[in-house]
């Protein structure tokens, strides 16, 4: 059995734990220096995963931005940017979204068996659509990614996807950035909602690093023994 990929979760939130506000515009929680750090983390991964809601709302490119880092990846014999991965329950994604249209990286879409035909009809021309069973679980996605040679996976959200990996105990490391302001709106999405998580008062996560990056603060947590710091 192929070992599952190393899973690194990355999230930015407000002081009160929100990852966005309730407006139609995307809330900027990071800054230029931290975005460059994230770019470096991306460059060191084999694949980047976001939920379908993030694809719809944020329309992310999920590409390595730095010319130098892209060249270094090519010199190592890998594509300029990691593979892009998303998970959808319905298959209702726009095939012209930047997730699909930008960059030559592999695009993988995991969906439940019941939505496979619809998802392949809609997205089969721009991505590889994978039957991930019913219902789709983080474990089934990781098993398939491992079979495809993915050894290091970066999960960039949103909150539902983060909660699924965390509650399943399938996260090895968490990079949590806190922006210096409050959102204060219960309609907005939070980092994670209610759930049963393996880390609790009786089992604390290990802090690897706390670093100020201009006006935000990064905390890196080790969530498994696979994380050596």
Image (cartoon, rainbow, N blue to C red):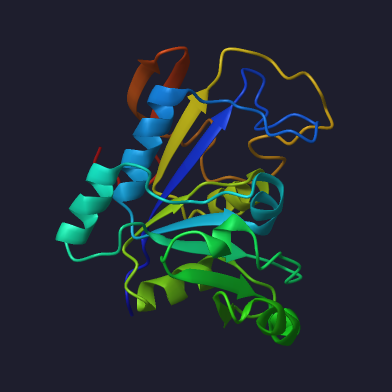
Name the residue furthest left. 75
User: 90 or 121, which lies in front?
Assistant: 121
Q: Give the image quarter of residue 67.
A: top left
Q: Residue 203, position in %: x, y?
A: 46, 37
Residue at x 44% of width, y 18% of height: 217
Which quarter of the rendered picture does the N terminus lie within?
bottom left
In this image, 155 relative to 42: left or right? right
Residue at x 52% of width, y 36% of height: 11
Eyeballing the image, is 66 above or below 77? above
In this image, 133 relative to 166: left or right? right
Residue at x 45% of width, y 76% of height: 144
Q: Is residue 225 visible?
A: no
Eyeballing the image, is 44 above or below 107? above
User: 219 or 28, which lies in front?
Assistant: 28
In this image, 218 relative to 88: left or right? left
Which quarter of the rendered picture does the C terminus lie within?
top left
Eyeballing the image, is 146 above or below 43? below
Eyeballing the image, is 70 above or below 77? above
Name the residue furthest bottom. 117
Give the tally of numbered discs. Answer: 0
User: 96 or 191, which lies in front?
Assistant: 96
Q: Give the image quarter of residue 39.
A: top left
Q: Is residue 68 visible?
A: yes
Q: Residue 216, position in %: x, y?
A: 47, 17
User: 121 or 158, which lies in front?
Assistant: 121
Q: Residue 46, position in %: x, y?
A: 34, 60
In this image, 144 relative to 56: left or right? left
């Amino acid at each position: 059995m192929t070992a599952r990929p190393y899973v690194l979760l990355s999230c930015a939130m407000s002081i009160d734990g929100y990852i966005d506000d309730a407006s139609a515009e995307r809330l900027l929680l990071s800054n230029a220096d931290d975005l460059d750090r994230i770019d470096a983390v991306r460059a060191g991964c084999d694949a980047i995963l976001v939920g379908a809601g993030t694809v719809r709302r944020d329309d992310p490119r999920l590409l390595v931005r730095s010319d130098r880092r892209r060249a270094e990846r090519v010199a190592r014999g890998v594509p300029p940017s990691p593979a892009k991965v998303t998970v959808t329950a319905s298959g209702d994604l726009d095939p012209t979204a930047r997730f699909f249209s930008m960059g030559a990286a592999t695009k993988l879409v995991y969906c439940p068996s019941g939505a496979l035909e619809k998802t392949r009809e809609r997205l089969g021309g721009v991505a590889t659509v994978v039957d991930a069973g019913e219902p789709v679980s983080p474990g089934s996605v990781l098993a398939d990614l491992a079979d495809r040679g993915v050894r290091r996976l970066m999960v960039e959200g949103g909150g539902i996807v983060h909660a699924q990996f965390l509650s399943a105990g399938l996260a090895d490391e968490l990079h949590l950035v806190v922006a210096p302001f409050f959102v204060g709106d219960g309609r907005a999405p939070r980092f994670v909602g209610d759930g049963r998580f393996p880390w609790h008062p009786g089992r604390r996560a290990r802090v690897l690093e706390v670093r100020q990056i201009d006006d935000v603060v990064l905390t890196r947590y080790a969530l498994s023994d696979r994380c050596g710091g």
